[in-house]
Image (tube, grey):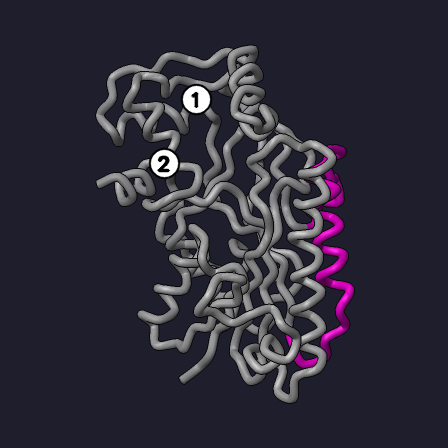
Amino acid sequence: MKKVVIAGGTGFIGSYIARRFKDSGYEVLIVSRSPGHVSWEPMVLEEAVNNSELVINLTGKSVNCKHTEENKKELIDSRIEPTIWIGNAIQTCEYPPKLWINASGSGIYKPSTTHAAIEEDNKSGTDFLSDLVELWEKTFFGFNLRMTRQVALRTSVVLGKNGGALKPLVTLSKLGLGGKQASGKQIVSWIHIEDYFRILIFLLENDSISGIVNCTSPQPVENKVFQEKLRAALKVPFGIPAPRFAIQMGASFINTEASLLLNSSYVIPKRLNDSKFKFSFPEISAAFKDLLD
């Protein structure tokens, strides 16, 4: 049985792809501090990744928090340290994995409503999130692994049934608060969680692909369109808009960053498109229909 190792596999994305890999006939090992999983102890981790088809690293504190100096340190450490541990384990195992996919973020790109960011873009943002992703990828690609192909998956908002960004948005929409946020012109790049899994399989099967890959739907939409389509899927006739000042006040109240909603994320999966990957849910209405049915 082919083996897949998922670091940080107990969260929203990790638990979904673990189940899908098991359904597809893979042996799945979860690396986590939680009891009953593979520990981060070096020899145990080395044994886990040895002779595996794929190692996926999803570890990292959620960016959905106030970016205080304390949280910034935790956001950095929770990404950099596990990446180093996995890289060291791969370097020392007898039969290295064929592919190592490290989570990354579309937040590295400069926010724009007019320029669609692609993998070849060097136009990084200037905020903390951009610096965080840049440092994470530098650590990841700092490992010179002759036998293991490496892919950094720059992922946007992942939409799924049992968590992530969609759950609170559904709640707000049902309360009549699902209108546009601020101007509504900021772009939302997103990906259906099943397409996320299918991209992992696609990368595993296509050994010509390495380096940076944007993991987003080919059809990003404006925030106001995103909210309209969500309300339509929920059969909610109206949604009260949230002005910029209200978002800033609300973000401060719940200890998160308003920029997570206000910044535009216009990202296109050029390398997947060029490689003829077929999205099951390229369009937002179909994604919502599947997830909210």
Q: Is residue 130 rendered magenta in the image?
A: yes
Residue 38's x, y, as percent?
51, 72
- How far apart, in angstroms, are the residues tagged by discs 1 and 2? 18 Å
Residue plotted at (71% across, 73% down):
88
Name the spot of residue 47 as percent of width and height, x first.
Answer: 58, 82
**Which residue is labeled 2 in the image?**
167
Image-quadrant location for residue 115: top right
Residue 256, picture quadrant? top right
Q: Is residue 28 above or below residue 112?
A: below
| Pointer 1 local density, CA inside 10 Å: few below 14, some 14–19, many at least 20 | many
Name the mark on residue 224. 1
Q: Which quarter of the rendering shows the N terminus?
A: bottom left
Q: Is residue 143 magenta?
A: yes
Q: Is residue 8 above or below residue 39?
A: above
Q: Residue at x 46, y 79 (%)?
A: 3
Q: In this picture, which residue range is highlighted in magenta?
A: 120-148
| Lower sequence index among marks 1 and 2 | 2
- What secondary structure is found at the residue carrying circle 2? helix
Foreground label between 1 and 2: 2
Q: Type of residue at label 2?
A: Lys
**For the residue marked with disc 1, what is the amino acid?**
Lys
Q: Nearer the viewer, residue 198 or 282?
A: 198
Q: Which residue lies at the image location 52% right of the left edge and 78% below the top edge?
A: 53
Q: Cβ–Cβ below 8 Å for labels 1 and 2?
A: no
